[in-house]
Amino acid sequence: MRLQVENMSCQHCVRAVTAALRALDPQAQVEVDLARGEVLTEGKFDAEAAIRALADADYPARLSADADPA
C-alpha cells in the first residue's frame, strides 16, 4: 500500500516509520521516500493498522489517492 506520511524529514524519521510498521509485521517491506512524503509498504496488516501505528509514532498518515487499501 502507498501512504502519504507527514512529519518525515530525516533518516531518524525513516527508521521510526520503518520500526512502527515492522512492529505490526517484522517481515514487512517498507520503502520511504522522504522527498515525496510517501511510504510504500507490504506486510501482514491492513491500512487501518498501518495508519494507526504511524499516528502512534507521531507520523500522521493517510492512503495515497492512487493506493490500494490492502
Image (cartoon, rainbow, N blue to C red):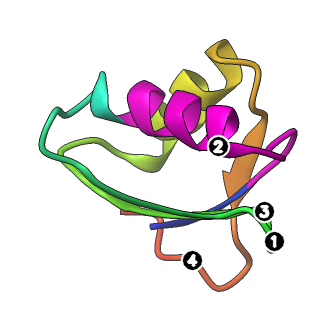
Q: Marks 4 and 2: CB-CB under 8 Å?
A: no
Q: CA distance from mark 3 to mark 2?
A: 13 Å
Chief secondary structure of the magenta span? helix
Residue at 80% in and 74% down: 36
Q: Marks 3 and 4: CB-CB under 8 Å?
A: no
Q: Earlier in the sequence, mark 1 or mark 4?
A: 1
Which residue position is annotated with label 4?
67
- Coordinates of residue 67 in the picture (x, y in percent): 57, 77
**Magenta span:** 5-21
Q: CA distance from mark 4 to mark 2?
A: 24 Å
Please give the label number shown on residue 11. Answer: 2
Residue at 16% in and 33% down: 26
Vertical position of residue 8 compared to residue 20: above or below:
below
Three-letter code for the amino acid on which mark 3 is drawn: Gly
Q: Looking at the image, which residue sits at the far left?
A: 27
In terms of image quadrants, where is residue 14? top right
Q: Looking at the image, which residue sits at the far top?
A: 56
Q: Secondary structure at mark 3?
A: loop
